[in-house]
Image: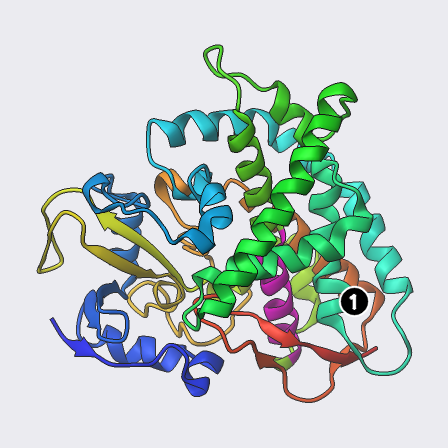
Amino acid sequence: MKKISQSPVDPVFVQDPYPFYDHARRFGDLFFWEDYNKVAAVSHRAVQTLLKDRRFGREKPTELQTPGPDHLAAWQAIEDHSLLELEPPRHTRLRSLVIKAFTSRSIAAMTPDIEQLCRDLIHEFPDEPFDLLQTYCTQVPVITICRLLGVPEHMAPDLLQWSHDMVAMYQANRTRQTEDRAAQASAQFTEFLSNYIDLRRVEPGPDLITKLIAAEEDGEKLSRDELIATCVLLLNAGHEATVHALGNGVKTLLQTETRPDVLDENRIDGTVEEILRYDPPLHMFTRYAYEQVDLFGHSFKRGDEVALLLGAANRDPSVWADPNQFLPSRDVVTNTSFGAGLHFCVGAPLARLEMRIALKALFDHCPSLRLEGDPDYSNTYHFHGLTRLMVTT
């Protein structure tokens, strides 16, 4: 197996990781990423296989689990009950309860509300150059998830900050300062949600938190810790990835001077999928091997961690012709941006709906939208999103 070194905090790499993926893919389905000290899957077939193979999972094998440091106790308390980090049988039970509340019908019912939200935000655009990321791409997902869960919208700034501080734990440039901020955000998030859940128990509403409180599976309900962790996950995942996907999508449409007819009713779904393929908001997920597994010429031992490079899988030339070109007419049927298998993103339908509505509303109401300067990606990996997106209308 080829050993390759590439710093994940190198600014050149962070701004454009795709040349590195192309280089690594030349050596096969897997390579050893020296900077992470682990095997990485770089081809589409390897990423898809490992996402779906139940001999691999998110949860660290029991014998490798160790208590976390005391200063991360508040953050770890949420992680220990997070749907994202669990495997069956706990994952099966939690996901079934979430799906009962997070139905396709409840998501589809939000369409008029999201459309009106987009119109309201666009109406407030200033005449001079402004940051579309903050005024639109961030606001649509965070307000939508607040409304879906029933969380007061005036809490959106706090929720954003808590979320940013918590998800920074997954980034390559994590420091002790990152950990302290994540722990503080976790404690504040937990306190807020704990109080809000108490309120919803005595004053139920039509929101998702009320539905999660009421949901049962085989006579079991979510525990308080599970409720808090699930709400944190839905709030964080419900906007972090969509913010990046929207920003990356607008940037791509403007830089490639793509004709607005790709957002017509009969074409927009394909355009959204191509945006997610071409420049996804998340580039790496990891899995642990649960037994000895021989795949793609490598023997994984129990406990081995493997990095699944979603951004690389989406640019694999064995699957797509001209993968480094943005082609809205492309038939994208195997997009890995939301994962696959057991941990396929439960919020994917909502993210797609938000992108569909927000992109169409933006370009319908702002046909002369153009970039002001070159957008920069945030100096973080393995998330992939912009720091700002300056535009004029």
- Say which residue appears at 67% left-offset and 51% top-offset: 354
Residue 49 is left or right of residue 358, and the answer is left
Q: Where residue 310 sits: x, y (%)?
A: 38, 61
Asked whether 93 falls inside the magenta stretch, the response is: no
The quadrant of the image that shows the N terminus is: bottom left
Q: Where residue 145 sits: x, y (%)?
A: 69, 45
Residue 340 is left or right of residue 298, and the answer is right
Instruction: Indicate the secondary structure of the residue bearing disc 1.
Output: helix
With respect to residue 43, does 33 lie above or below? below
The quadrant of the image that shows the C terminus is: bottom right
* Residue range (magenta): 239-254
Front residue of 257 and 197: 197
Tally of numbered discs = 1
Quadrant of the image occupied by residue 232: top right
Front residue of 77 and 286: 77
Asked whether 240 falls inside the magenta stretch, the response is: yes
With respect to residue 115, does 221 lie above or below? above
Q: Where residue 104 sits: x, y (%)?
A: 61, 32
- Say which residue appears at 62% left-offset and 23% top-offset: 213
With respect to residue 29, does 120 lie above or below? above
Front residue of 82 and 193: 193
- The residue labelled by disc 1 is 135
Asked whether the viewer can see residue 223, the reply is yes
Front residue of 198 and 98: 198
Residue 160 is left or right of residue 286, and the answer is right
- The amino acid type found where label 1 is placed reads Thr
- Say which residue appears at 44% left-offset and 47% top-offset: 76
Quadrant of the image occupied by residue 242: bottom right
